[in-house]
Image (tube, rainbow, N blue to C red):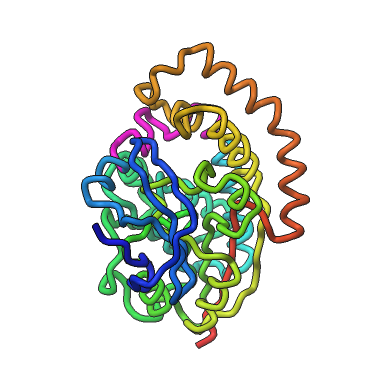
Amino acid sequence: MKSECTYCKSDNSSFKYSTIDIFESKFNIHQCNECSAFFLAPNPTQEQLAEAYSESYYGEKEEKFEGIFEKAMDFFRKKRAVLLTKKLPNGASVLDIGCGNGRFLSSLLNYGDFKLFGVELEGNSAKRAARIKEINLKVGTIDQKDFPESSLDAVSMFHVFEHLTQPKETLEIVSEILKKDGLFVVSFPNIDSWQSKFFKGKWLHLDPPRHLFFFAPIDFKMLMKQLGFELVHENYSSIEQNPFGMIQSILNKLCEKREVLFERLKGNNNYAKEYGKLNIVFQKIFFISLFPFFVISNLIIATFKKGATVEFIFKKIK
């Protein structure tokens, strides 16, 4: 089986630690000695990826998460929309790669008249996005021919980059289709975070085999500079991602199987059936009890740039 770097395709890498996915397949985390990316080794097979992206991944009900959690997701989508629209002219064209249910894009319309484009893989999320008539949706993956050169004002990828099988090519496409001074908004797990270093193979945001690779923020910023981008915003605090990441990672340490609570919140009740209703209730109480503490710790940790996730906004200057 192949063990090449997902980003640069080099086979020159160093072993870091091991992890097990929710299907009980074992992977190693390697760091590439050429581009410094961390990646899954061996590389997941097409069969493993197909299983990982079954309908249960997208949520088997009308929404991806249970009611109150989906409403919380909408709140954070609107926060991202406010941040982006403050930096864009009215009428700007915005592409969201991996647009999910499309509700981030549609929330932009609360703050101006924008041209909306989305790309999403086939599945329940794409079906949800297709219901929003204002979005020009492509079901599948982005291709160089999808948009003319220098045609878009902004491109976003929220926790999508680490899923890509062709990340280098995708960044090159983003660079090509953005206008000069166009914005690229990207967020992903921070492999250099304190969560990552403490929990290692039990860290929620490893999410094998779906998360194929990771860049430390310092390496990603250097990579974007080489592509002709300048950093205009960075944020290591995420109430949406980081507190839950800490709590689920603790539960991963305590439970034999990983991501039990996370999968149940998506309505995937067939996962880890050996954990009965009482156990799941306990895990939910554990989450609710500790969440306020980890919200505060998330804010403190972010000041050291060691938050579990990172969000960047880059401007294309070349």
Q: Is residue 51 left or right of residue 19?
A: left
Q: Does the magenta stretch include residue 317?
A: no
Percent coordinates x, y for residue 304 in the rendering: 74, 60
Count of labels in the image? 0
Which quarter of the figure has residue 72?
Answer: top right
Q: Residue 262's x, y, as percent?
A: 49, 32
The reply to whether residue 181 is visible in this rendering is: no
Q: Examine the rendered structure and indicate whether residue 273 appears above or below residue 11.
A: above
Describe residue 177's horizontal placement relative to residue 85 as left or right: left
Residue lying furthest left:
47
User: Outermost residue, bottom direction?
Assistant: 318
In the rendered image, the vertical position of residue 108 relative to residue 239, given as above or below? below
User: Relative to residue 288, is residue 155 drawn left or right?
Assistant: left
Instruction: Identify the residue at image location x=54%, y=44%.
Output: 203
Please state the horizontal and vertical placement of residue 28, each as a whole percent of the image. 40, 52
Rendered-image quadrant of the N terminus: bottom left
Q: Which residue is drawn at 46% across and 62% down?
A: 38
Quarter of the figure with residue 267:
top left
Residue under the image location 63 percent in, 59 percent down: 83
From the viewer's side, name the closer residue of 232 and 118: 232
Chain part drawn in magenta: 53-71
State the image coordinates of residue 97 (x, y, percent, origin top left).
40, 59
Q: Is residue 103 visible?
A: yes
Q: Which of 304 and 84 is in front in this view?
A: 304
Relative to 140, is 197 on the left or the right? right
The image shows residue 201, relative to residue 261, as above or below, that is below
Camera-nearest residue between 57 and 133: 57
Q: Within the magenta stretch, is there residue 54?
A: yes
- For image coordinates 27% across by 53% down, the residue present is 139
